[in-house]
Image (spheres, rainbow, N blue to C red):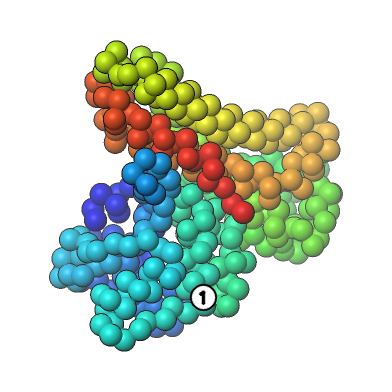
Amino acid sequence: MTYLLRSGRFLCYDPGNLDTVVQRRKTEVALPPSNVMTLFDSPYLAKAVFFKEAYSDDGDELSVGTRVMFVFNENNALEGGASVTAQPDDLEDALAKWYGGKVKIDLSMHDRNVLEVFCKTPTFDPFLLLAQRREIERDRPVDPTSFSIDAGTAEDVRAIVNARATALVNLAMGDDVEEKRIRATVQALEEAIWRCEANQRTGRLFQSLGVPPDKTDRILFAWKGIAYYEYLFRNFATDYAEFLIWLRGPQSIPKDMGSLESRRAYRLQSLRRTGQTVMRGYYTHATEILKKHADAYDALLGAGNPEPFQKFLLAAPRLFETLGLSIGSFGHASNAWKTLTNHGRRPNRNAEALEAFYRFISTLAASKLN
């Protein structure tokens, strides 16, 4: 359980804040107050931990799956418990067996909605989940903090948002506007982006950027999300580079390659090439979108040409999801690589270990939102 909780928001989702509770009160698992719009209706799911894992359908092909681990010993929550796939029907059967005995436990339609979204997204990235909020909230709203990020990350992302807002407001208002008014408008724009809601002070600015009123909130949400992924990309840039270097280098070749029969050696080489293509593709998608963002922003601030930035903002909702999937899936594979190779420091692995790894990262190419 400790490993799961430390594996990062991409790979682990803890709806009941079990990790926080365990650190604060070592022997107790607390449920949230009854007046909070919890993510799940079922109290059993409030004490569960969701995680992404590689799984095999037939002993050969690996895929990215979603599982649930239940806490059985509430006096020592980190012991964890049994786990099951998060597919709603399978989960209902498991809950009935583990908690209800002969009594059938039916998940609410809301819980089934949440589980379906969890199962179809390749990671638990909070912004990626929020992009599916309409599906999650088909039957009832949830507390927005269900998909919040930690305070340190929020502060760093907000700094990026503030820098963008400050430059845009200074450009739009000019030098003859008093500093107090500029600061108030910057703050209003920052809040609009952070809350994903337009406000009175920023309406004229969005109109000047060519943002249609009926699309403003959706664009603001994507704008905030892109700032978040910009932060992640900066933070993980070294990991990404080291992973790609390893993937192209001699350490990614099995140490027993020379003893493999030709058919298996060919298959492994093919899987390795596919893995390289998939990871390079995700990396390229992410860098291209972030560059497009930077170029459009520079064209607006440097040359006074608003058209590229207007086009980027209108495309932002689509680009945001593509960026999230690219960075999330790359991060998913990078975490698996760290485990396999001790962050690239472990000597060459054998064919069996590397073949499973290459199959796993190849399946990430099929992980996409429907």
Amino acid type indicated by mark 1? His
Q: Nearer the viewer, residue 1 or 81?
A: 81
Judge left or right: residue 36 versus residue 17. right
Which secondary structure lies at badge 1?
helix
| Figure quadrant of the C terminus | bottom right
Can you tell which quarter of the image residue 353 is in?
top left
Residue 319 seen by the camera:
yes
Identify the residue at image location x=24%, y=67%: 71
Identify the residue at image location x=64%, y=31%: 288
Q: Position of residue 132 (x, y in %)?
A: 59, 60
Q: Nearer the viewer, residue 2 or 253?
A: 253
Identify the residue at image location x=58%, y=64%: 133
Residue 189 seen by the camera:
no
Q: Nearer the viewer, residue 92 or 12?
A: 92
Q: Position of residue 352 (x, y in %)?
A: 29, 30
Q: Which residue is mark 1?
A: 110
Disc 1 crowd rating (10 Å Cα; few below 14, some 14-19, many 20+) is many
Q: Position of residue 54 (x, y in %)?
A: 37, 46
* 199 versus 349 height, above or below: below
Judge left or right: residue 351 versus residue 136. left
* 190 versus 305 height, above or below: below
Identify the residue at image location x=40%, y=63%: 86
Q: Nearer the viewer, residue 12 or 142?
A: 12
* 364 versus 260 height, above or below: below
